[in-house]
Image: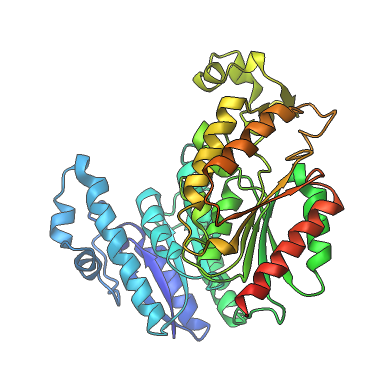
Amino acid sequence: MAIAVIGMLDEREEALKIIRNQIERRGHQAILIDISIGTGAISPSLIPEVSGDEIAKLGGTTIEEIKKAPTHEREKVTSRMAEGLTRKILDLYKAGQLQGVIAIAGMTGTFLSLNAMKSLPFGLPKVLISSVTAMPAYASRLSEFFSLRDITVIHSVVDTVGLNPLVRTLALNGANAICGMVEGLEPLKKEDKPSIAITEFGFCDKGAHYIRDLLASEYSLVSFHATGLGDRAAVDLVRQGFFEAFIDLVPASFSEYLLGGNRASGPDRLDAALDLSIPYLLSPCGFDMISCGPIERKDKGDPLWVSRKLAERKLLIQDAMRVQARTNAEEMETIAKAVSEKLNRYKNKKLVKFLIPRRGFSSLSVEGAVLYDPEVDQVFIKTLKKHLDPGIEIIEVDSDINQLEFARVVVEALKRTLESLST
């Protein structure tokens, strides 16, 4: 088994050589993978185990075609390299030859390497030394990778082109880090108790706590912070088969996607268990609000603020960055219809349960709270009942989401659904 070392030899030969030598010095085999695309000024003397031409061919092209591609087509050709690198890394992993992977890169190399690292499972050591991961302009794009995979990032601070004492230290630190991870790696083991995923955030924390307490003796609960990024991780790991059930207490990153909120996670948010035979329980927590900070956007005439007519809405302003606006009746109807459409696609509808806390979808919409509006909540409930397939059970509870009573109903529904799978 070996550690893959990824980088562009025509730009970072010195650093890649240090990394490979240090890995081998510590008793591990290194597989050097060159992903050069002709942008560097070096004519490398180091011979890789996997050439750039092999990577290009795996991506359906040749290194010559990539190197002669005009600048305006660079993204197109580099995507071929990303595809080829991912295929090579996956081939090594599936063949049982891969212990870990480390990359040192600038902008292009970072995204090439991240595509490959994203394809690898949770727990396999992954280290990226990069000068661009702290750049705010790329935060959204980078989050697509870091929210889904356990990638360890060493922010290089300086560019890693050429060799100097700082780059040398970075290369040695990275090599020692990946070796340490590989040497201390223990295979990911499932708990003796069945594992259950649960989404939550601050406006249903008490309810989530009650659910965890009620299930703790029989199940292992894994919580995901429903802020958009955490939702993506939950969906990804549920799809990988890590869990025996999914309690989606806060599916609101789907409504945030529909309405343009800050916690959006994409159109496939409710598809996590679509092709799995596991219980999927969800509630409307978070559908009662739109996350729309920072507050300064109101003064700048931001289209989101204008389109939502926030001046006419109930708002919770936690601070300058965190602002929650009450969803209105029209939006609740839109959410309910879209949720119904998504859930109606589930083949085994008996495994899907929608639990509704009638006295408050979150701590913000209970009586006396700032976003309290029971008439609007009722629009969601009526629309959901109208459009949701009758094969999917709707369970209404006469409490708010943060009450022990609601948690008990969730747990009862979960156990009943799990039992149905064994009969």
Q: Quadrant of the C terminus?
A: bottom right
**Residue shown at 74%/58% (left/top)?**
410
Q: Nearer the viewer, residue 165 or 368?
A: 368
Left or right: residue 390 versus residue 399 is left
Whether residue 338 is situated above or below residue 369 in the rendered picture:
below
x then y, percent, for residue 17: 39, 70
Q: How many marks?
A: 0
x then y, percent, for residue 236: 52, 60
Whether residue 75 is situated above or below residue 330 in the rendered picture:
below
Asked where in the image residue 160 lies, by quadrant, the reply is bottom left
**Residue shown at 65%/22% (left/top)?**
295
**Residue shown at 22%/54% (left/top)?**
38
x then y, percent, for residue 234: 58, 58
Whether residue 214 is situated above or below residue 69 in the rendered picture:
below
Q: Is residue 199 visible?
A: yes
Scheme of image coloration: rainbow
Asked where in the image residue 85 lies, by quadrant, the reply is bottom left
Q: Quadrant of the N terminus?
A: bottom left
Q: Nearer the viewer, residue 212 or 105?
A: 212
x then y, percent, for residue 343: 51, 52
Left or right: residue 165 versus residue 314 is left
Q: Nearer the viewer, residue 36 or 361?
A: 361
Q: Nearer the viewer, residue 23 or 372?
A: 372
Q: Is residue 150 visible?
A: no
Left or right: residue 173 versus residue 113 is right
